[in-house]
Amino acid sequence: MTDPSRPTATTAATTDRSPATGDGTAADHDTLTDTDYTADLPAAYAACEEITRREARNFSYGIRLLPAPKRAALSAVYALARRIDDIGDGDFDPPGGATVVSFEEKATALAEVRASVRAMREQTPDPFDPVLVGVADAARRYPVPLGAFEELIDGVEADARMDHAAEQLGEAARPHATFDDMTVYCRQVAGSVGRLCLGIFGSRPDEHAAEYADRLGIALQQTNILRDIREDLRNGRVYLPTGELARFGAELRLDDAGVLDDPDGALAAYIRFAADRARGWYAEGLRLLPLLDRRSAACAGAMAGIYRRLLEDIAADPRSVYAQRRSLSGAQKIGVALRALAGRTA
């Protein structure tokens, strides 16, 4: 996923059929009754939109620019994607159970979500899960490529395997030898989301529309990876291609204060190189916008604009990610969204 944060809503059906409360925990049967969300679609979508408001730190600025039907549908898509990502990060608390943390627990939870996606393709979502009901209804109204969720699950499974390998090795796992390797991962976890969004947006006929959406998602994920180098290393993950790091003479290590150690500036030089390459992916991906209606283009433009602005900030000062997680202020994000609504992407 492109903007990890906190747990969301329920998994597929549990034995007590507890719907989720607003904070993502299991509902208390003494205070709430079971809800059949297939009979109450507004409630299902309301739950999905609440998840999006709470968790989508960057995407919410774009989603709110959509008309209500598309906003609700995209919120449902986001909520399920968020759930998948939270499982991979060990941030997911299923109703009636402990937090999913171990590799085996993550694999089981992801398999359950995969089964839920396949059930949705057969028009049989769990009626007690508002997220699944919302996504299933969105897929009935829009050409949502539900198979893209399975690609996202593949990418998150790769993250879980990386975490498991790091635990076994006692050091950060480094699964990507080349940029092509990293691109495969980015396509799974972010290109898939771009294509899911395109299903909601719709576009004028163009055989390259899905490719542009895919590239835009990959551009966003490259930005995430550069932003989160330190955080990922602390968590035992290295996404950057080992071959490229070696070519630049850059090493990923933390000093005693937990700050990225780069005495000769080799890592900073690599970050500038990687940021320049990501600019090309944005340029390709943004060719999608003229194919969209005005509000959908504004939504996509705001999402992309926030990450592209963040990329430029990182490129201008690579060392700014060595000790903290860079982000834009709320005012900056609003400014990007307003420019996108006016049809400006720069």
Image (cartoon, grey):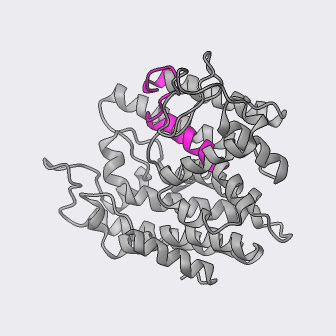
Apparent side of residue 292 relative to residue 330 in the rendered image (left or right): right
Give the image location of residue 159, x and y in percent: 49, 38
- Would residue 135 be seen by someone viewing this image from the given angle? no
> Image quarter for residue 40?
top right
Q: Which residues are magenta?
A: 77-104
In the rendered structure, does residue 295 fall within the stretch colored magenta? no
Measuring from the top left, give residue 234's x and y in whole percent: 29, 43
Asked whether 309 or 342 is in front, the reply is 342
At x 59%, y 78%, the residue is 340
Name the side, left or right, on which 214 lies relative to 156: right
**Percent position (x, y) of residue 185?**
56, 48
Q: Is residue 208 above or below residue 117?
A: below
Q: Nearer the viewer, residue 319 or 310?
A: 310
The furthest residue to the top:
15
- The residue positioned 50% from the left and 76% from the top of the image is 336
* Residue shown at the point (55%, 47%) measured from the top left: 51
Counting from the top left corner in percent of width and height, residue 286 is at 64, 73
Left or right for 198, reference 161: right
Horizontal relation, residue 18 to residue 57: left or right: right
Q: Relative to 281, is 105 above or below?
A: above
Foreground of the two, 292 or 75: 75
Taking 95 as reference, is 224 above or below it? below
Outermost residue, front side? 31
Residue at x-position 72% and y-position 46%: 42
- Hey, which quadrant is residue 146 in on the image? top right
